[in-house]
Structures are given as structure tokens and as C-alpha cells.
Image: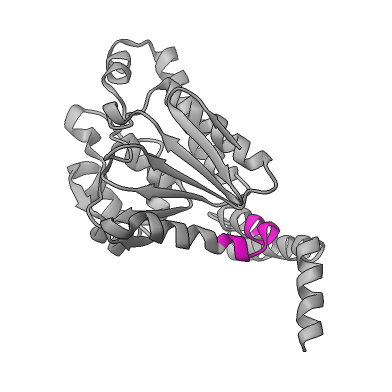
């Protein structure tokens, strides 16, 4: 099944939903159409029971270079209300990624900068080519990586987050892996095959268990220990009631 918008390509191959940022001539820079296309594609993946994992990548040499010139010009001249609406749209995208039932993976080659780095960081997992670069250069133009701060702060230590957002420097994929922003770094020449092998692993595990695990992981963030345990208990009961769990236990007992 294939579908596309002007700026985002969407394709399902078996259990894998491929979502491609399709503005290579603009280094896949973010604009209203691209953000809207991403939200639409993610929603489609969420509604498809056959999908086990969604992968976001960029067409061309870069993953995403952040906001495009048109968006920056709009920020400079927009009213408070317009800026709030624009910010809410990006917030909705980040929230949607967390609410999706399936894992969302950023497959990063080239640059992931500013809002593009925010998009990658907002994904559940980040896979990067060895030559990929990450960074939050917003401070260089008087801007703030504001909403992604809530996600970045949950991925890396406070001091590392402070350094990233106040110096605005680019870091390598290996450095991203070392500080916790990146899960795996693959050789550029084998990147597509390595990503394929990695994401296909989700075909071998329970979709419902992964969905419940993802929801629980983010739900307990910020809870006290007792509340987190009680929330985990609710998820435990929910998991036991799923067909996947009942069938899995039956298979295990049969082998024993």
C-alpha cells in the first residue's frame, strides 16, 4: 500500500511503515505542510493493525535541517497568536509520536539540526549513520529549542542538555550515542541494510506487549515510586488479558 503527500511519502511494507521527509532540495526543512504530512502519516500507521514499527527518514543527503527560511520569516513577523498556533502544531507532532501504539524510529543520515534534531530526539529510537551530525543551533539566531527540551532532558543528563542547547554546537553520531541521544550507529555504506535488520526485529515480538510497554514507560515518567508500581500493576493485568499473552503462555507451557 502506498500513498503520498507533496512533502511526505508514506509506504507500508508488511509490518513496516516507511515515512520519508521528501524535501531533499530544502534538506527536508520543516514547514507547515511537512509537519502536517508527518502527523497524517503517523496516524495512518497507528490505525493499521498490520504495522509493528514506523521509521522516519529523510530523502537525499540530510535527515532534516530544521525550519526552512519561509518558516523563519514567518516567526520573525508573526503575531503572538500565530506563533502560538505554529508552536502547538509541533507540540502535537511530538505528542503524537509518544502516543502511537507502535515504536517510531528515526533513521538519521546527514544532518539532523534544530527542529530536525528535535524530531529525531522525539522518536522512540534513533539509528544513525556514522557520518550523521546532530545539534541544536537555535541560540545562534536568538531562538530556543523549547518544546523538545522536555524530551531532550529525559534522554540525557541535565549538564549535557544544558551544553547542547546553550552552545549550539554540532555533535557526531558517536557522541550522540555516548550521551544517550542515539541508540545505534551504523556504517554509512551498510546503513539501509542495518536499519532494515534492526526494525524487522519488531516483527518477532508481540505488538500488544510492545504497545503496553511503550505506554507504561512514558506514563510512569515523573511518578513517585508507589504510583509507578501501581501503574505497572495495571499494565501487568492488561497484558495478561491480551490474546498475545494467552497464546504466548500456552506455547511456553506446551514446550515445557
Say which residue appears at 55% left-offset and 34% top-offset: 41
Depth check: give the residue in front, 48 or 71: 48
Above or below — where is 32 with respect to 236?
above
Quarter of the image where the N terminus is located = top right
Indicate the position of residue 13 as horizontal and vertical percent values: 57, 47
* Percent coordinates x, y for residue 160 in the rendering: 27, 55
Q: Which of these two is toward me, 103 or 2?
A: 2
Q: Residue at x 39, y 31 (%)?
A: 22
Residue drawn at x 31%, y 31% as measured from the top left: 24
The colour scheme applied to this rendered structure is one colour
* Segment tinted magenta in the rendering: 202-212
Residue 111 vs 243, above or below: the answer is above
In depth, the one of 159 and 156 nearer the eye is 156
Which quarter of the rendering shows the C terminus?
bottom right
Is 140 colored magenta in this rendering?
A: no
Number of numbered labels in the structure image: 0
Left or right side of 22 for 252: right
Asked if residue 177 shows in the view, the reply is yes
| Residue 145 visible in the displayed image | no
Residue 207 is a magenta residue: yes
Q: Position of residue 155 (x, y in %)?
A: 39, 55
Please tell me which residue is depicted at 66% across the width and 66% down the height of the picture: 229
Q: Is residue 154 left or right of residue 130?
A: right
Task: Note whether 186 is above or below 20 in the view shown.
Answer: below
- 219 left or right of 184? right
Q: Nearer the viewer, residue 13 or 7?
A: 13
From the image, give the main secondary structure of the stretch colored magenta: helix
Q: Position of residue 115 (x, y in %)?
A: 34, 35
**For residue 68, which quarter of the picture?**
top left
Amino acid at each position: 500500500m502506498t500513498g503520498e503527500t507533496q512533502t511526505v511519502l508514506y509506504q507500508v511494507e508488511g509490518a513496516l511503515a516507511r515515512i520519508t521527509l521528501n524535501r531533499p532540495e530544502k534538506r527536508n526543512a520543516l514547514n507547515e505542510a511537512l509537519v502536517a504530512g508527518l502527523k497524517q502519516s503517523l496516524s495512518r500507521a497507528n490505525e493499521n493493525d498490520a504495522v509493528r514499527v514506523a521509521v522516519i527518514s529523510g530523502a537525499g543527503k540530510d535527515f532534516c535541517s530544521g525550519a526552512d527560511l519561509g518558516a523563519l520569516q514567518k516567526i520573525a513577523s508573526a503575531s503572538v497568536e500565530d506563533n502560538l498556533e505554529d508552536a502547538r502544531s509541533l507540540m502535537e507532532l511530538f505528542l503524537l509520536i509518544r502516543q502511537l501504539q507502535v515504536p517510531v524510529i528515526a533513521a538519521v543520515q546527514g544532518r539532523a539540526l534544530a527542529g530536525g534534531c528535535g524530531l529525531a530526539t522525539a522518536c522512540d529510537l534513533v539509528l544513525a549513520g556514522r557520518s550523521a551530525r546532530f545539534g541544536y543551533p537555535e541560540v545562534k539566531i536568538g531562538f530556543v529549542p523549547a518544546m523538545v527540551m522536555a524530551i531532550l532532558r529525559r534522554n540525557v543528563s541535565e549538564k549535557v542538555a544544558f551544553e547542547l542547547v546553550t552552545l549550539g554546537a554540532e555533535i557526531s553520531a558517536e557522541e550522540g550515542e555516548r550521551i544517550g541521544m542515539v541508540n545505534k550507529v551504523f556504517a554509512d555504506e551498510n546503513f539501509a541494510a542495518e536499519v532494515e535488520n534492526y526494525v524487522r526485529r519488531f516483527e518477532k515480538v508481540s505488538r500488544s506487549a510492545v504497545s503496553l510497554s511503550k505506554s507504561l514507560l512514558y506514563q510512569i515518567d515523573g511518578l513517585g515510586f508507589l504510583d509507578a508500581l501501581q501503574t505497572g500493576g495495571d499494565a501487568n493485568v492488561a497484558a495478561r488479558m491480551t490474546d498475545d499473552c494467552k497464546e504466548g503462555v500456552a506455547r511456553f507451557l506446551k514446550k515445557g
